[in-house]
Amino acid sequence: MVKKNACIFISGKGSNLKNLILKSRDYNFPIKIKLVISNNKNAYGIFHAKKNSIPYLIVNTKLRNFEYLILKSLKKNKINLICLAGYMKIISKNFLSKFNKKIINIHPSLLPKFKGLNTYSKILKNNEIKTGCTVHYVNEKIDNGKIIIQKNFFIDSSDNENTIKLKTQRLEYKAFPEAIIKIYRNF
């Protein structure tokens, strides 16, 4: 199988990155992670890149040309797919138009509900009976692109933000790889 080259964008712990690295080792998984990009020099996810000998780029998003630097690196590594995995920076329209390939994101709610930040507190405040995660294509609007896959679970009366986060992350580790497989089955 000829694998597509992927880049994972992170800002934090990188647990989805770690999971995708493990999945990418499977012969039948359609991507190879060629690059990790972080807007946070202290992101723990960089450790996963180093540990697995994956090149990484830390970008200072305060620099005017930071998107140019990212695009240059994506081109150099022949990236076909960008996976946003906890990347806490909005992708500009300019970037979207220049990287006209695929950009997907994982979000910790059942979109279109609870877009943006503070998802778990919003879920609890609205007394939701179920929640989950969504993998979707990225477009100009936050958490608004076409949905690829969703996974859900019922909320227990004893759940709090922490338990909901842990349950959601467990689903994310299944949903992200499944979404990637689904994308490349459609090529």
Image: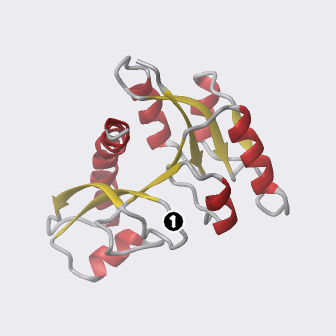
The structure residue drawn at horizontal position 59% and vertical position 47%, both measured from the top left corner, is: 9
Q: Residue at x 58, y 22 (%)?
A: 52
Q: Is residue 137 left or right of residue 182?
A: right
User: On the picture, is 33 further left or further right than 151?
Assistant: right
Q: Position of residue 178 (x, y in %)?
A: 30, 40
Q: Nearer the viewer, residue 35 or 74?
A: 74
| Left or right for 137, reference 120 | right
Vertical arrangement, residue 147 with respect to residue 144, above or below: above
Q: Which residue is under mark 1? A: 139
* Residue 141 percent coordinates (x, y): 51, 73
Alpha-carbon neighbours of circle 1 within 10 Å: few (<14), some, or many (≥20)?
Answer: some
Quadrant of residue 45 in the image? top right
Q: What colouring does the structure picture have?
A: secondary structure
Q: As displayed, is residue 183 above or below residue 137?
A: above
**Image side of residue 75 versus residue 101, left or right:** right
Across and down, in percent, residue 126 comes to: 26, 82
Q: Quadrant of the N terminus?
A: top left
- Residue 146 in the image, given as x and y percentages of width and height: 37, 63
| Farthest-out residue, front | 187
Task: Report the quarter where the C terminus lies.
Answer: top left
Residue 81's place in the image compared with 106, above or below, is above
Q: How many marks?
A: 1
Residues 14 and 158: in front is 14
Tell me which residue sits at (65%, 66%) in the image. Answer: 92
Callout 1 secondary element: loop
User: Hey, what amino acid is under mark 1?
Assistant: Asn
